[in-house]
Image (tube, coloured by chain):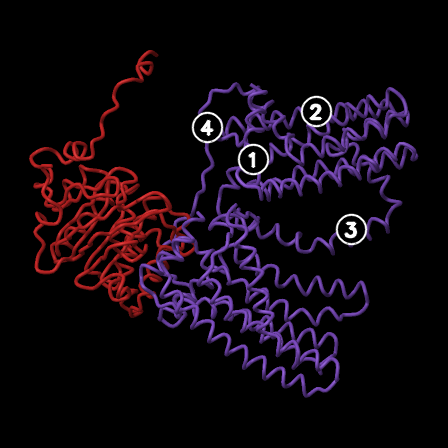
Amino acid sequence: MVAHLLRLKLTLLRNGLRRSPWQLLGMAIAGLYALGVVAALVIGLVLLRNAGTGTAHTAVVLGGSAAVLGWGLIPVVASATDMTLDPARFTTFAIPMKQLLAGLAVGGLIGIPGLATALVALATVATWSRGVLPALAALVGACLGVMTCVVLAKVVTTATASLAASRRFKDISALAFMVPLVLLGPIVAGVARGVSASTGFLPDFAMALSWTPLGAPWALGGDVAAGRPGAAAVKLLVALAVLAGLAWCWKLLLERALVTPPYAGAVKRKGGRLGLLGVVPPTPAGAVMARSLTYWLRDPRYSGSLVVIPLLPVIMLFQGAQTGHYGGLAFLAPISAFILAWSISADVSYDNTAFALHVATGVRGVADRLGRSLACLVFALPVVLVFAVGAAALTRDWVALPGQLGLSLGILFSGLGLSSVVSARYTVTVPLPGDSPFKKPPGNVGQTLAVQFVGMLVLLVLVLPEAALLVAHAVTGNAMFGWINLVVGVILGLVFFVAGVRLGGRWLDVRGPELLAQVSVNR
Amino acid sequence: MTAPIPGQASNPGPIAALSIRGLAKRFGGKIAVDGISLEVPAGSFFGIVGPNGAGKTTTLSMATGLLRPDFGTAVVHGVDVWQHPLEAKRLMGILPDGVRLFDRLTGEQLITYAGLLRGMDKAVVAARVGELLAAMDLAQDAGTLVVDYSAGMTKKIALASAMIHAPRVLVLDEPFEAVDPVSAANIRSILDRYVASGGTVIVSSHVMDLVQRMCDHVAVVARGRLLAAGTVDAVRAGASLEDRFVQLVGGHSHTEGLEWLRTF
């Protein structure tokens, strides 16, 4: 039965890859990356063999604890990523619990994270191959540690399965996941600095950790090598007890989960609150605007980009603090304008077949385009203005502000006009409604890339006048160019905006049904 | 064929609510709809029945302006759907099957949105939304996001969105799928009253019993072609609609085999 489950997992993996060469490519890239990381860690661990016992012990225990912690935490936010062996799918088959547990546990090892963890853990045997006993202890520790990782992940996923099935949790965890991802650079730099500042404290920390469930299995080899067999024996007991306890928890949770499928409960709410739909002018364009704005707030696929925007200045300020000069802030407003304006270029693709309502009601294309653009403009305009003025205030470079504003507003308005045209004609593959913003469905990747690339090129051409004026300002130092840029940016941007909305609207009127047919393919 | 000839026995009134002529659609190498012509008389409760994959949804999509036909025309109360789409869509309320909704809106917001998209007056929309929610038995869940609705509730909210502008023709693709019996009875009485006051309802379904009880006219579609059309009594010709349907479509062949299923 265990072999059966393993074969199932491998078959699922292979069939998944067979579905599209792009998925194979993605897997290959991830595999190469993981291979690099694993190779570096394994080499490090082998080299640690020649280091002092204390240093090696500290490094192995800290690394191992981090691995256990990672296996426990990451499934909470990424639980939807690997549900190939979702226990709920085995409910209708009468599989004995013991064999199901063993099969699922070993199955959890298959895949890039599992294999990488196992390889690195086995490398600790090399670190402690300073005698037969330490190596043996390290081997036992590595096996216990890896099993603890896998079972902990299973306990966490099973426990949160019903939570993870609720839409609200999915929405929030996807957004919460975005923050550390965007701030990865500063976080890594900060942690590295903190660690290097307090190296003296690390051995004590590792020693303390080695008595906890996180570090106990990883300390076995080190303790035996350092001649502390008593401590090693106690830690072995701790590690065994933890693994047994986790396995027992998992069994209980799984038994319960198999008979109580996840329930995505929702609170009943009476009506009476129209939200933004009650605020906007009661016209088709107003309704589209209110609906789009509601989606910007409620749909994680949209609000994901909203989360990124306030983090942009944080990254740039951090970079400025590190290098000492804040020149990068000059890009803040134009980049934000670009991200926000381009974000609606896939609007109809994001609607998916819900766009049928627009076709069925016969809403005019111009109203559709205008509503979507205005919804974006409502927050994009203040954001761009605040960023441009804020950057000028921080760098005390008020002379550059008019030119900055001209370029940023030019990008924003021209970009919105261009997006209105692009999303009226071309569809791209985007995460489906209700899916995580990180999930790219397999689809017409070629067209997606072409639309994105050509669209950006066109935008570049559209804002060439503003960019040229900015360069002229920088080269000549004549402030006049900045003011001209402001005027040109606003006027040219508005012209492109109006033209884009009208052209996109006309295309939508003519080709609405074809566009609906295109998005229907991707569902 | 003993069935009435399509288009003639349905005895259209002076002007048909929906008149489709030679509609055809091909997807790649597969012909989904192969020249269907149909007259739906004004004021009729018209059922379209057919096995899975018969082309019902494709035909209705082409007749309502959601899918451009390769050949043929569709005319609603004298307005050509593909020549004057905006005018035609004003006359129709459409419940498409198998499409998503803007489900991050609450039920109340979704119906309001459908009304405002059609350029209706705000006060009128507000009044009708309240009545529709009550009629669909959704008043208690009006503030819940549609994404959290059950399948039946989702169907009902989509139906309400299709009715808000008081269309002259309602085109409903599988309107009773997953809807509980009480709500289905409510919806049927709403539709009956709507038809009694001169409206036209076109429903697709593969529940023959329902169509026989509910509709006065029926069309049988299979493999992209129209097999029979006319009043329900004329089409079923004394037999039950289900028996007549199976006879027309020519299924029900495979009851042999699977003996092992009885060897437990």
Q: Indicate the position of residue A313 as horizontal and vertical percent values.
A: 68, 65
Crowding near the residue tagged with mark 4, few <14, some 14–19, many ≥20 C-alpha atoms within 10 Å: few
- Viewer-proximal residue among B216 and B257: B257
Q: Which residue is mark 3?
A: A191
Cβ atoms under marks 3 and 4 closer than 8 Å = no
Pinpoint residue B130: horizontal percent, then vertical percent: 28, 59
Tag 4: amino acid: Val
Label 3 CA crowd tier, 10 Å (few <14, some 14–19, many 20+): few
Q: Which mark is residue A226?
A: none
Name the secondary structure under disc 2.
helix
Give SS at disc 3: helix
Residue at mark 4: A259
Judged from the image, the secondary structure of the residue bearing numbered disc 4 is helix
Q: Earlier in the sequence, mark 4 or mark 1?
A: 1
Colour chosen for chain A: purple
Q: Pick the residue in front: A357 or A137.
A: A357
Q: Check disc 2 and report the residue beneath it.
A: A241
